[in-house]
Amino acid sequence: MRRLTVEIAGLEPGARLLAPAGMATPAEAVAAASVTGGRIAAVLPEPELGLAALEIAAEGGPLTLSYEIAPGGPAYPDIMFAPRATRYTTPADDLAQASVEVARAAGGGMAGIAALVAEAEARFAYAHPEVRFNDGTEAVPYLSCGLTTGSCIDINTYLVASLRAAGFEAGYVYGYFFPAEKGGVTDDMHCWVVTRHAGVVQHWDIAHHMKAGLGPARDALNPRPGRRVALGHSMGHRYGHGAGVVTLKLLAEPVLIGADGKPGPAPLVARLAAP
């Protein structure tokens, strides 16, 4: 059993947060979650994804969210791979056409997946842009030439849309990654892509291959030394009900919910204790 803690400092009494309840993967599963410095006021299901959010009421001062992570778990859920009509996953027509052609030229199957991974990798230079390549669009646009700056979020948004357009099962997974050199501490979320074809599951982390200078991306859950914890999947989430619904691109780390009901960042430090 491993313990993941997420620490948030300086909260006002009564501050409201939403945090992922967690998920299960073949590697491990979130077995329990608890809070100090606040209380879990409700568990809000996401109606389409089989996930849930913890609605947390802060008591004021520092707050710590703790997850108990058990080894081993079930297969990835089918819903994670299912195409959904959201602006984050629907490919533009020209991206869909190009993706089909790339996969077909590679011979389809596993070779087609590898070709689309390479194609996505060739379209990006790793960075954290202030404006994302798909901001303001209703579908994931085709990047036909040159390099576009993007983080793991941008790269994997493009990759999932491309893979699904070509008829492959692809899931977008997120949580935390703890680089080996940082001793089990991080302050940011991370995401990666899982494909499933002919009974074979593969893991793709283009961003880590780029950042670590590892060469062309290959199937590997941890190409860069470190540990990761998956807390959720997919993009386009809705939590709550009635006037209290919160709509999010994803829920990878706790977010503050303002008086207007809109989410905002919560500065945090995440720690993963060794088993």
Image (spheres, helix red, strand yellow):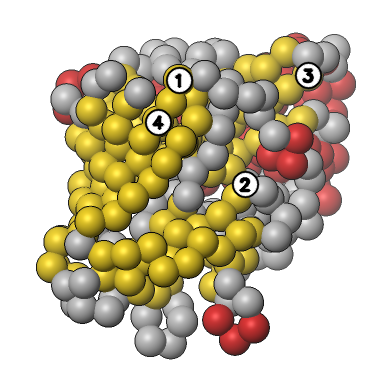
Check contact, mark 3 vs mark 1: CB within 8 A: no
Task: Give me the C-alpha separation between circle 2 and circle 3.
Answer: 18 Å
Q: Quadrant of the N terminus?
A: top left
CA gap, disc 4 and disc 1: 7 Å
Callout 4: 10 Å neighbours few (<14), some, many (20+)?
A: many
- The residue tagged 2 is 234
Instruction: Classify residue 122 as left or right of residue 101.
Output: left
Residue 183, can we see it?
yes
Residue 81 shows up from this direction: no
| Label placed on residue 69 | 4
Per the image, label 1 sits on a secondary structure element best described as: strand
- Position of the C terminus, as image quadrant, is top left
Residue type highlighted by circle 3: His
Q: Of label 3 and label 1, which has the lower sequence position?
A: 1
**Quadrant housing residue 110:** top right
Q: Amino acid at mark 2?
A: Ser
Q: Do the residues under discs 4 and 1 have CB atoms within 8 angstroms? A: yes
Residue at 46% x, 82% y is 261
Residue at image position (39%, 74%) is 257
Is 135 situated left or right of 199 in this image?
A: left
Q: Position of residue 7 (x, y in %)?
A: 21, 51
The quadrant in which residue 240 appears is bottom right
The residue carrying mark 1 is 71
Give, as a three-letter code, the residue at label 4.
Ile
C-alpha gap between disc 2 and disc 1: 22 Å
Identify the residue position indicated by label 3 in the image.
197
